[in-house]
Image (spheres, grey):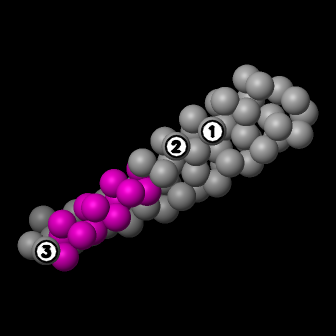
Amino acid sequence: MDKDLRDRGTENEVKGKAKEMKGELRGDLGDATDNTSEHVKGRAEQVKGKIQKNFGEAEKAVDDAV
């Protein structure tokens, strides 16, 4: 369990950070082009990425505690 959980945590952390950055860029692009729909979609993707990243950090913390 220890190595598996740590690996999954790292994977979720990296994928979440990438999704967060992509969403921020998409939201900024929506702002720059005055496209509200793209802005909202980008910010939603950014939040999903932040949640995934934090979940990965929590998985790693649980692994360290066990």
Q: Which numbered disc flags the more N-terminal residue, 3 or 2? A: 2
Q: Vertical placement of 35 versus 16: above or below?
A: above
Q: Vertical placement of 49 versus 14: above or below?
A: above
The answer to whether any part of residue 59 appears in the image is yes
The N terminus lies in quadrant: bottom left
Q: Is residue 17 left or right of residue 10?
A: right
Q: Which residues are magenta?
A: 52-64
Q: Is residue 10 left or right of residue 31?
A: left
Give the CA distance from mark 1 to mark 3. 33 Å
Kindly report the secondary structure that dominates the magenta region of the rendered protein.
Answer: helix
Dot 1 corresponds to which residue? 43
List x then y, in percent, for residue 35: 83, 26
Check contact, mark 1 vs mark 2: CB within 8 A: yes
Labels 1, 3: front one: 1
Dot 3 corresponds to which residue? 65
Residue type at the position of mark 3 = Ala
Q: Vertical placement of 12 versus 65: above or below?
A: above
Labels 3, 2: front one: 2
Residue at point 49%, 62% (across, down): 14
Residue 47's label in the rendered image is 2
Within the image, what quadrant is residue 13 found in?
A: bottom left
Q: Sort mark 1 into few (<14), some (14-19) or many (20+) by Cα contacts within 10 Å.
A: many
List x then y, in percent, for residue 28: 78, 44
Q: Secondary structure at mark 2?
A: helix
Q: Is residue 60 magenta?
A: yes
Residue at point 73%, 41% (across, down): 26
List x then y, in percent, for residue 54: 38, 57
